[in-house]
Image (spheres, rainbow, N blue to C red):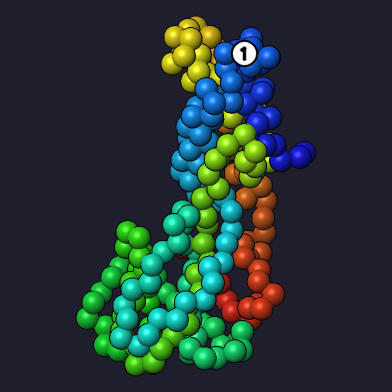
Amino acid sequence: MAIATAGAVLLQASGLLNDVAQSLFTNTVLLPYLRIAYDELQIAMDGYQLPFVKKEAAPVTVTAGATTMTAPTDLIRPVELLERLSGSTRPEDYTEMNEINWDPHISPISEKNYWAWVGTAFVFPASTTDRQVVLQYIAALADIADANSTVQLQRIHVFLQYRAAALAAEFVMQDMGRAGNLNTYAMTNLDAILRAAVRSRQAVPTKRRPFRFAWNRRVQRRIY
C-alpha cells in the first residue's frame, strides 16, 4: 500500500463532508484539522510504546568535563546511548551506556558510563577523557506542512481522513450528528491500526534486535 500525501487525505476528508469539489472544505480549511488528527495518532501510538521512526543521531563529542548533551528536537523516547573514546575510528570500540536515575555524585573515570534523560537534554557524569556519544532513538513523525507533505506511516490515512472530517463537521459545520458518525469510523480505524501494530511487535522474536546498524553489530543492545 502506497504512502499517501496530505493532499490525498484532505481530498478524501472533503468527500466525507459531501464536498468532493472542495468548494467549502478546501485544503486550507481542512489542514489544521488534519494536523490535529496526526498529533492524536502519535499520542495514541506513544501510549502503546509503538515505534514511529527509528533514527540514529550523528555522533557528538562530549568533552571530559561536560555533563550534558542536547536531545534532538524530534525525540519521542531514547532507545540507547553508546560511547567510545573521542578520536576512535573503530565501530567495535562503542560500548553501551546505562540509564540511571541521575546521581551527581559519581566520581569521574575515563568513561561516562551512565546517562539520564532530563527535559531537553541528556546528562552524564563528568569523565577524564573526551567521549564520542551516539544516540539511537524513536523520532516523531515529520510535521505536515502543506498538502504536498508525506503521511509517513502506511495504513493510517483512513483514520486521518475520518478524524479530520469529524473535526471539520464539529467546528465548521457545527453538525454534531455527522461529527459523531465520522468519529465512530475514525476510532474504529485507529483501533485497527493499534491492534495491528501491537500484533506485529509481539510477533518479533525476542532475540531480534530493534536496531541493526551494519557498523555496530558487535555491540549488545537492550530496550529500556
Q: Residue at x 66, y 68 (%)?
A: 212
Q: Residue at x 71, y 40 (%)?
A: 3
Give 113 or 133, whichever is nearer the viewer. 133
Q: Left or right: 188 with respect to 171? A: right
Q: Residue at x 50, y 69 (%)?
A: 135
Q: Can you see residue 37?
A: no
Q: Left or right: 145 with respect to 200? A: left
Q: Position of residue 15 (x, y in %)?
A: 66, 16
From the viewer's perspective, is residue 165 above or below residue 156? above
Q: Residue at x 52, y 22 (%)?
A: 29
Q: Residue furthest right?
A: 1
Residue 105 picture quarter: bottom left
Q: Position of residue 217 (x, y in %)?
A: 66, 77
From the viewer's perspective, is residue 40 above or below residue 163? below
Q: Position of residue 174 (x, y in %)?
A: 44, 9
| Residue at numbered disc 1 | 23
The N terminus sits in image quarter: top right
Q: Can you see residue 178?
A: yes
Give 108 or 4, whichever is nearer the viewer. 4
Q: Position of residue 164 (x, y in %)?
A: 54, 24
How many marks can you see? 1
The amino acid beneath tag 1 is Ser
Give 180 or 100, whichever is nearer the viewer. 180
Dot 1 falls on a residue whose secondary structure is loop
